[in-house]
Image: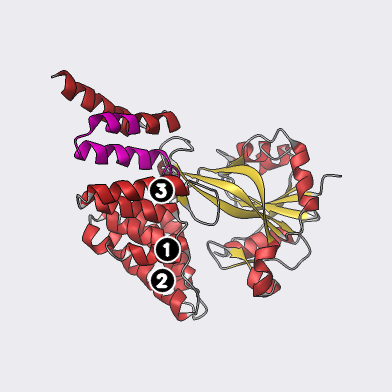
Amino acid sequence: MNQPTISLCMIVKDEEAQLASCLQSVKDWVTEMIIVDTGSTDRTKEICESFGAKVFDYTWNNHFAEARNFGLAQAKGDWILYLDADEEFEPLHDFALLTQLNQEQAAILTVHLINYIGDHPNEDEAFHIAHPRFFRNHLGLRFQYPIHETLNVEEIFPKEQLSDLMGHIPLKLLHRGYMPAITAHKKKYQRNMALLNQEANQASSNPWVEYHIASEYYRVQQYDKAFEYVNLSIVRFIQSGLMPPSLLYKLKYAILFSTGSIDGAWPGIDKAIALYPDYVDLHFYKGVIFYLKKWTSSALDVFYHCLSIGESTGQHLTLKGAGSFHAWYYIGLCWESLENNQKAVQAYQTALELSPTYTLAAEAIQLIQKKQSL
């Protein structure tokens, strides 16, 4: 079966530092590169042209969706692939995998998105999720919203068909955009908040706006504001007759943990777990709550349950390790609290086997060995 035609569509501005890696990762299997430049003053356009990309100048109007849609209008491929310059795919060695695009009945395909959060790229210091990046061209799919733009899926397809329209292709997409150094350099907080506040003042704004505002406040450690807005987002989803998405609850309890509000997190987290019983991160937070409250035996049960859930790349934004090495580390802490150092060391060693760079587990083993040698 022939490989389908794929149009890479991107919007860029002053991305010379990361752009080449992005384009290099797809150059052998996309049919065309459509790049919309919103006013670069560095070598961005030159780099794009060196990869054979078609570069279109676009006057920036504070609206990401409109800029992306301008690029879509130029695309000729059977499928659209959209990326940002701070993303790149892992090397694709089996190009036959792309024939799956032709075989799929789905209109939209997710990939395995890895959002790095540490100082260095490390899959163990990252959030993982299945994220839509491929969609069929010529179906009327377009982006909406000035910032954190999403596809207008609900406008094009009946709600009851949505699950049948989504598929998955096992490609790993690496995202560096929210690593601390890159976020600070690009002043994302200032840019994003200006656009989000502008959107929040529109009568047509949607509940995602408050979530994204909460996320921005959380990243700059303004936790009171973050908590206010994530709760507002949850309320607005409910008022709209929609179940709040799982990552809203993840953010809510992450905020409470960051402020030390353990009593504020319990027992409310059980209500979130009832909505999303397969979300390992929520169970992990519950285990940490029990551990901090010194309900150690109950905490052990919860962490072992996290291991049984595991970590699949699906609809939930999942912290790597919540169903594996982080859970084993806390199992070690629990066994230490119960004065069973043998089981504690075994748990820490298992955590290290799963994540060799996990320094907390290595340090915990060293501390136990040091105490035993005294």
Give the residues drawn in magenta, as a range. 320-347
Which residue is at a point 27% across and 29% down the rendered structure image? 342
Q: Nearer the viewer, mark 3 or mark 2?
A: 3
Instruction: Give the CA distance from mark 3 to mark 1.
Output: 20 Å
Instruction: Give the CA distance from mark 3 to mark 2.
Output: 25 Å
Q: Is residue 130 above or below residue 18?
A: below
Asked if the residue under mark 1 is in contact with the one under mark 2, i.e. CB atoms within 8 Å, the reply is yes
Instruction: Give the CA distance from mark 2 to mark 1.
Output: 7 Å
Q: Position of residue 300 (x, y in %)?
A: 30, 46
Q: Amino acid at mark 3?
A: Cys
Task: Judge from the rendering whether residue 40 lies leftward or rightward of residue 203; answer left or right.
Answer: right
Tag 2 secondary structure: helix
Residue at mark 2: 234
Asked if the residue under mark 1 is in contact with the one under mark 3, i.e. CB atoms within 8 Å, the reply is no
Figure disc tally = 3
Q: Position of residue 270 (x, y in %)?
A: 34, 63
Tag 3 secondary structure: helix
Residue at mark 3: 306
